[in-house]
Amino acid sequence: MSLFFPALASTDTIGTSLNGKRISVSIRSFIPPKMKNNFLTSLSFDETTHYQVDGAEQVFIDCGAFHYVDEKVPKFKKGGYVNARSAIQHYIHRHSNRKNAAKSYLVCSPDHIIPPDMSDIDSKNRTKWTIHVAKEFIELCKEIPNFTPVGVVHGRNKNERLVMVEEYITLGYKYIAFGGLVPIARNESLVLEQIAGISDFTEPKIDKNSPLGLAMLNGCKTHMFGLNSPEWYRWWKRMGVTSFDGSKLSQEGAANGIIWSSNEFDIKSPPSSAKGLYTKTKIKNIGERNWIEGKDGIYELDVKGESILDVQSSGWEFYKDSLCMNNNCKQTSFKHRPDPRTTGSVEHNMGRTIINAHVFEEIMQRIDNLVEIADKSNDEIYDDWRSIGWE
Ligand SMILES: [Zn+2]
């Protein structure tokens, strides 16, 4: 399994009732255990709420490069210049020194993002700065036993990314992450070409002289930043990528009002992509909603035309007996369930993120299963699921 780190911002919280009072808790309390205990957070966001839940195993921290992408000189969103020493200090004080700290940390060496349309001179300067900082960063990490330094690769094309991978390997990095992929994410073949040198999509192979190929052949673990749809997971799993992260669960669930549900399918005739493994339902398409008084005078939502939550969803199981305690909820003035098939408050909105997290966990297990079957079979119906070998 390629390990998924949900990228959590300070807004990834949900209100729940505790002894009749509303408390706001990290969604870590309600998502599947692996996601709860292995998450990613950025120095740009306040992390406090996520440490109020215990059990963290491995936390991935990035230095928040996205927030200074337009700055010539990197500055943290919360103030101060970015360099190896300042980043380490933030990682220690804001993370590993906390109560409920994780057992171990994957810590990003500070990077400066190179957008696809950047000029030659700026691109060169950013590469130089990132590698210069990475030299000192890996040395400082040697003094901290539970920190694993991660080198972050940028570049406008395969060759520029390859140069950075070579630098990180020379410096001794054992974990290499690929950044700057989100702007090109819609172009799947471009991403796979830049990362792994894949050109033939009917029989994909990883090029040994590609950024990913070189990292893997040198025994490095690898990570993909921000590409976290089920379809991307299918690629990461087949390519043997160690880990990936992203905030799709919150974006699609809470912000865009989409609920995921798993599709039934016959294992003997699998779909050709992960898109066939689940369905996305937009709650704005629900035709009619009625609040109906249930037991103890608590109102429950009845919808016409969609019955998403009739599907067994372990995400919903966690808090369906809970109450929406949000004073600002636009739904109703009476006691009601925090049903995620409607909007109105963070209780309803984040509920979708939680449901989607549980469905994503199921999808990843199905993909793992399909890859396992495909690797033992020569049948061409499994061609889209087989592990990808070397060129
Ligand atoms: Zn409500």
Image: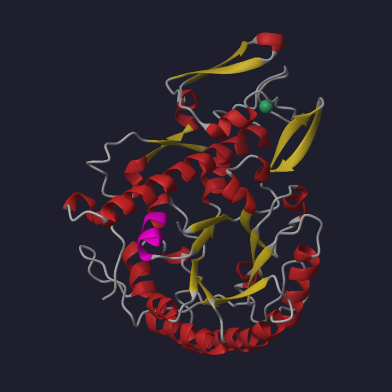
Q: Is residue 123 visible?
A: no
User: Position of 336 compared to 19: left or right?
Assistant: left
How far across and down, in percent of the image, does residue 111 sit? 60, 77
Q: How many marks?
A: 0
How far across and down, in percent of the image, does residue 333 sit? 73, 19
Name the one closer to the observer, 117 or 172: 172
Q: Quadrant of ligand 1?
A: top right
User: Position of 338 compared to 158: left or right?
Assistant: right
Give the overall secondary structure of the magenta segment: helix
How far across and down, in percent of the image, does residue 147 sit? 68, 72
Q: Is residue 267 magenta?
A: no
User: Which of the image's four quarters has the N terminus?
Assistant: bottom left
How far across and down, in percent of the image, does residue 36 sit? 63, 48
User: Which of the image's four quarters has the C terminus?
Assistant: bottom left
- In the image, the segment drawn in magenta is 233-239
Name the one closer to the observer, 374 or 72: 374
Name the one closer to the observer, 268 or 349: 268
The residue at the point 73 percent across, 56 percent down is 47
Q: Residue 327: which quarter of the image?
A: top right
The residue at the point 47 percent across, 44 percent down is 360
Q: Is residue 354 visible?
A: yes
Name the one closer to the observer, 348 or 202: 202
In the picture shown, does residue 248 fall above or below 190?
above
In the picture shown, does residue 150 fall above or below 168?
above
